[in-house]
Amino acid sequence: MEHNPRWTVRQAQALFAKPFMDLLFEAQQIHRQHFNPNHIQVSTLLSIKTGACPEDCKYCPQSARYNTGLAAEQLMQVEQVLVSAAKAKAAGSTRFCMGAAWKNPRDRDMPYLEQMVQGVKEMGMETCMTLGMLSTAQAQRLAAAGLDFYNHNLDTSPEFYGSIVTTRSYQDRLSTLDKVREAGIKVCSGGIVGLGESVTDRAGLLVQLANLPEPPESVPINMLVKVKGTPLSENEDVDAFDFIRTIAVARIMMPRSHVRLSAGREQMNEQTQALCFLAGANSIFYGCKLLTTPNPEEDRDRALFRKLGLTPQPHHTDSGDEERRRQLADAILDADTEQFYNAARG
C-alpha cells in the first residue's frame, strides 16, 4: 500500500488484518526505502522527578492515586542529571531523554530544566523531555534552550482513552503536541499496547498519530508493563504477534518516523524483538531502567545487536565544551547516590 497522507481507521484495520508474513514483508520494504535496515537509534531515559503524580493514568505506577510502593522523589539536581547523561553517552546512547512525573511543569522549575537541556547538548547528545502538558511559553523556553524532542504520548484511541485517563483530555494531549511543534521542537508520541484496547483502538491510535499535521519524528510503541497496585495489573498478556503487527502497521503508516520498541522489552525474548526490528522498529531505549520499570541491560542489547548485525545509528552534533566534558567524566567516579538512579548503568 502506498503511503497515504490521510489515513482512515478502515485502512488501518485492513493492514492489521493482513496475513502476518505479508504484513511484515510490506513493512520491511517500506522501512528499507527510508532507513538503513541495519542501523538502530539508541536512547536512554532517566526519571528526573519520580512519583506523586496527580494524574490517574491506570497503567502508571507513578500516580499518587495508586499504592505501588514507589517512593516519591523531588526534581533531581542539574549536575546529577548531567553525570547520568555522561554515563549514558559512554554506554552508547546518542539521545538522552528526561522524564518528570508531573501533570505540567511549574514555571519555577523551568530554569533547572533549561540547564539540563543545555548541559546534555554540550556533550553532543540529542535531548528529549517528557514533562506533561506545556504552555506555549514553556515550549518556547525549552526550544530556546536547545531541546530536540518532546515526548507526549496519546496512549490509545480517542474512543478508548476515557477508560484509561480522566484527569487530562485527549485534546489536552493534542494541544501540547501542537505547541511543541509550533515551538520548533521535534515530536515524540506513541502509545501503549495491552491496556485492554481492541484492534480497532490500536488502529485508531495510529491514525491519530499518522494524521497529525506532521507525523511524529519518533513513535514509541510500548507494551504494558503490569505493576501491582495499578488498575491494569491483572490485564491479559499481549500476544507477541499482535504486538509485532502493531509495529509493522506503524511503520507502514509513518514511513519516515523512527518507530521505537519501548517499554516491555524486558518481557520479550530475542526472537520477538528481532521480528519487531524486521517489522520496522529502528529505535530502542537503552539502559537498565525506563523511568520506574525494568529494561534489558546494555550488555544484553549489545549481544542481540551482534547476533542481528545491528549497529547504533550515527549522530553528529557540535562537540560542545571539552572542559565541561572532562569535569563530567571525573564526576562519574562519584556519581551514584540514593537520590537518583542511573538509567545507563548495567
Image: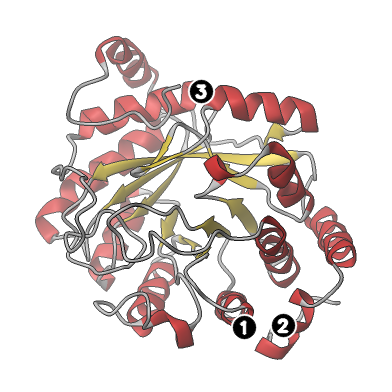
Q: Quadrant of residue 339?
A: top left
Please provide percent x and percent y for residue 283: 62, 46
Secondary element type, mark 3: helix
Instruction: Tell me what residue is drawn at x 52 percent, y 49 percent.
Output: 264
Instruction: Tell me what residue is drawn at x 72 percent, y 59 percent.
Output: 241
The disc labelled 2 sits on which kind of residue? Gln
Please provide percent x and percent y for residue 193: 54, 65
The answer to the question of whether label 3 and label 1 lie on touching residues, with beta carbons closer than 8 A, is: no
* 167 with respect to 175 (left or right): left
Of the two numbered discs 3 and 2 in the rendering, the one whose residue sits closer to the viewer: 2
Position of 342 relative to 36 (above/below): above
Mark 3 or mark 2, earlier in chain: 2
Q: CA distance from mark 3 to mark 2?
A: 39 Å
Badge count: 3
Please provide percent x and percent y for residue 302: 64, 25
Mark 3 or mark 1, earlier in chain: 3
The answer to the question of whether label 1 and label 2 lie on touching residues, with beta carbons closer than 8 A, is: yes
Circle 2 residue:
13
Q: CA distance from mark 1 to mark 2?
A: 6 Å
Quadrant where the C terminus lies?
A: top left
Give the label on residue 200, or none. 1
The disc labelled 3 sits on which kind of residue? Ala
Quadrant where the N terminus lies?
A: bottom right
Q: Quadrant of residue 101?
A: bottom left
Please provide percent x and percent y for residue 268: 61, 44
Secondary element type, mark 1: helix
Q: CA distance from mark 3 to mark 1?
A: 39 Å
Residue 323 seen anywhere in this rendered image of the structure: yes
Q: Quadrant of residue 164?
A: bottom left
Give the label on residue 143, or none. none
Circle 3 residue:
91
Density class for disc 3 (Cα within 10 Å; few <14, some 14-19, many ≥20) is some
